[in-house]
């Protein structure tokens, strides 16, 4: 992930809220990725989760029979991932510098992190590390703003780097090309604590001035307390759209 962007490496400063507030990913999205791009012989294969954070997406890869490697540049996030998923090997690295051998992975996943990388450099690194038949899966959880209160939440929170990015046709660099795309709609229940943690775990909120953050959180509390679909609730049904793009390396004839 780009070393020059202060937001990209800010998450470890609030690792607790990241772990509490960030959603997991739907199992059917993971299964679709594995059907589209997964290893044919899991016992002999390696899957790499790049930009793994605390292991929110990594967890869905565990238990399918292959070796799972997590690559994460932030030491605090890697430590939490290792606590959460002790069977996963967590390595320091970035999209531009993967600490892996040539043709050593059947699948590389990048969940909620492609917008932080140098696309051309990372695409070359991914192609180097993938086996000849291997694939890249680029994944995002995006709040479903077709729901009225979620749209109002976006007005309160503002937009994250992920939400500003093209997550439907994400750019890839040579020698990769996009080959498949699918969306998965799902809902996760969040407590009030998790809801606030979801907001305060965002890079642009972590790096806000205190007064600006406090004002935004006050507006968030007002929305939860006063919107007719939310008032009086003790948990909140957050609707997400999980967007998945599969890419593979172009092979010369």
Image (tube, rainbow, N blue to C red):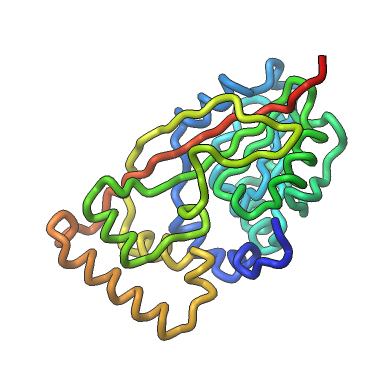
Q: Residue furthest bottom?
A: 211
Decide: is 8 above or below 229: below
Q: Nearer the viewer, residue 220 or 92?
A: 220
Q: Nearer the viewer, residue 40 or 246?
A: 246
**Picture residue at 68% right of the left edge, 27% below the top:** 248
All told, the count of numbered labels is 0
Quadrant of the rendering where the C terminus is positioned: top right
Q: Nearer the viewer, residue 180 or 41?
A: 180
**Picture residue at 15% right of the left edge, 66% below the top:** 226
The percent coordinates of residue 185 (x first, y second) are 36, 35
**Picture residue at 41% right of the left edge, 78% below the top:** 213
The percent coordinates of residue 109 (x first, y second) are 63, 37
The percent coordinates of residue 142 (x first, y second) are 42, 47
Q: Residue 240's image quarter?
A: top left
Decide: is 103 above or below 203: above
Quadrant of the rendering where the N terminus is positioned: bottom right
Q: Residue furthest left?
A: 228
**Picture residue at 61% right of the left edge, 41% below the top:** 171
The percent coordinates of residue 60 (x first, y second) are 54, 36
Decide: is 107 above or below 73: above
């Amino acid at each position: 992930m780009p070393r020059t962007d202060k937001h990209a490496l800010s998450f470890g400063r609030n690792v607790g809220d990241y772990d509490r507030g960030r959603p997991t990913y739907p199992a059917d999205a993971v299964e679709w990725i594995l059907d589209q791009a997964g290893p044919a012989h899991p016992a002999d294969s390696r899957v790499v989760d790049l930009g793994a954070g605390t292991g929110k997406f990594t967890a869905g890869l565990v238990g399918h029979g292959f070796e799972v490697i997590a690559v994460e540049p932030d030491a605090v996030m890697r430590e939490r991932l290792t606590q959460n998923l002790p069977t996963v090997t967590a390595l320091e690295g970035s999209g531009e510098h993967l600490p892996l051998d040539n043709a050593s992975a059947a699948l590389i996943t990048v969940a909620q992190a492609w917008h932080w990388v140098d696309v051309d450099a990372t695409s070359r690194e991914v192609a180097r590390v993938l086996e000849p038949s291997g694939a890249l899966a680029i994944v995002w959880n995006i709040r479903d703003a077709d729901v009225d209160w979620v749209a109002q939440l976006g007005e309160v929170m503002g937009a994250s780097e992920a939400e500003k990015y093209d997550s439907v046709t994400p750019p890839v660099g040579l020698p990769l090309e996009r080959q498949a795309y699918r969306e998965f709609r799902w809902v996760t229940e969040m407590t009030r604590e998790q809801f606030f943690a979801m907001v305060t775990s965002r890079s642009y909120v972590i790096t806000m001035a205190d007064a600006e953050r406090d004002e935004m959180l006050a507006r968030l509390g007002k929305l939860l307390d006063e919107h007719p679909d939310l008032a009086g609730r003790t948990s909140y049904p957050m609707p997400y759209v999980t967007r998945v793009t599969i890419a593979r390396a172009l092979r010369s004839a």
